[in-house]
Amino acid sequence: MSGRADVCVVACAEAFRGDGEILAAGIGGAVTVLAARLARLTFEPDLLTHDGTCLLTGDVPALGEAPEVVEGWLPFREHLWLVLNGRRHVMLGASQIDRYGNTNISCIGDWARPKAQLLGVRGAPGNTRCDPTSYWIPRHSPRVFVPEVDMVSGLGTDRGAFALRRVVTNLAVLDFGTPDGSMRLVSVHPGVSVDEVVAATGFDLDIPPDVPRTREPSDEELLVLDRLDPARSRDREVAA
């Protein structure tokens, strides 16, 4: 039987479907790393994956394990080349995100006197301008899904983002497939209602007439996940 974390990993993996031979990069936790590795081991075998630092992996190791087969060295300069040439699909996190997918990982509050200092913009501008980008938000709430971000770190569809694919949360899957590029509800996870997603979102979502349920993992995918994450680190990352 699958749990909420399994559904979230599979939903994140689906963001990489159709990518082919580009670098799939999950940032910031077990779920996104598992998603890239699950996609490569099932429906997207041409994906490139790495060990989290500087090695392209020929095999797909479990979380925390070193690869047995190394396909190449990926120093930072080569990683930047991939980013600047659209050869990387990254799944990022966000402290704030608005209806057009502008994200903030820099500060909370007024720029002149912020309430909290966060990471800075990091690589978000380059990633969102040059490459496919998706997001994993483990706690879907109005504090994260806001009418306007306090600072734009990652570009949204209204600011020239290259391709915003998916936003996966602990409640739902969303995308930007509307005429104006605003956020649309794609599916709700098993046990979650549309009303719950609406209540947890601080702006108006585009909601189709019949919102499906996010698909659950297949038996094959569950076996792969259990091999990649036998300690179920993914459960600790997904808010109930």
Image: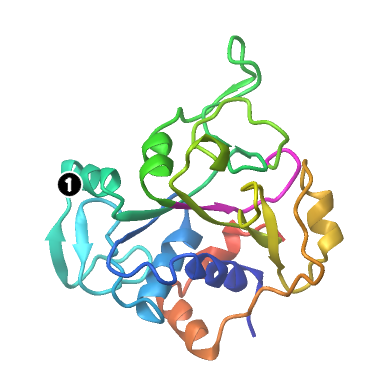
Picture residue at 54% right of the left edge, 40% below the top: 156
Instruction: Name the residue nearer the viewer: 16 or 234.
Output: 16
Instruction: Name the residue nearer the viewer: 236 or 162.
Output: 162
Instruction: Name the residue nearer the viewer: 219 or 184.
Output: 184
Q: Quadrant of the C terminus?
A: bottom right
Residue 189 percent location from the top left of the image: 71, 69
Residue 130 percent location from the top left of the image: 36, 44
Picture residue at 47% right of the left edge, 77% below the top: 225
Q: Amino acid at mark 1?
A: Glu
Residue 13 percent location from the top left of the image: 48, 69
Quadrant hosting residue 120: top left
Q: Residues within 10 Å of mark 1 (few under 14, many from 20)?
A: few
Looking at the image, residue 160 lies above or below residue 139: above
Quadrant hosting residue 6: bottom right
Picture residue at 66% right of the left edge, 47% below the top: 182
Q: Does residue 238 appear to the left or right of 56 in the view shown? A: right
Is 143 included in the stretch rendered in magenta? yes
Looking at the image, residue 133 lies above or below residue 111: below
Q: Residue furthest front?
A: 179
* Magenta segment boundaries in residue numbering: 133-144
Q: Which residue is mark 1?
A: 78
Q: Does residue 69 appear to the left or right of 23 in the view shown? A: left
What secondary structure is marked by label 1?
A: helix
Instruction: Name the residue nearer the viewer: 119 or 180.
Output: 180
Q: Residue furthest bottom?
A: 219
Residue 91 percent location from the top left of the image: 46, 53
Protein image colouring: rainbow
Number of residue marks: 1
Q: Quadrant of the N terminus?
A: bottom right
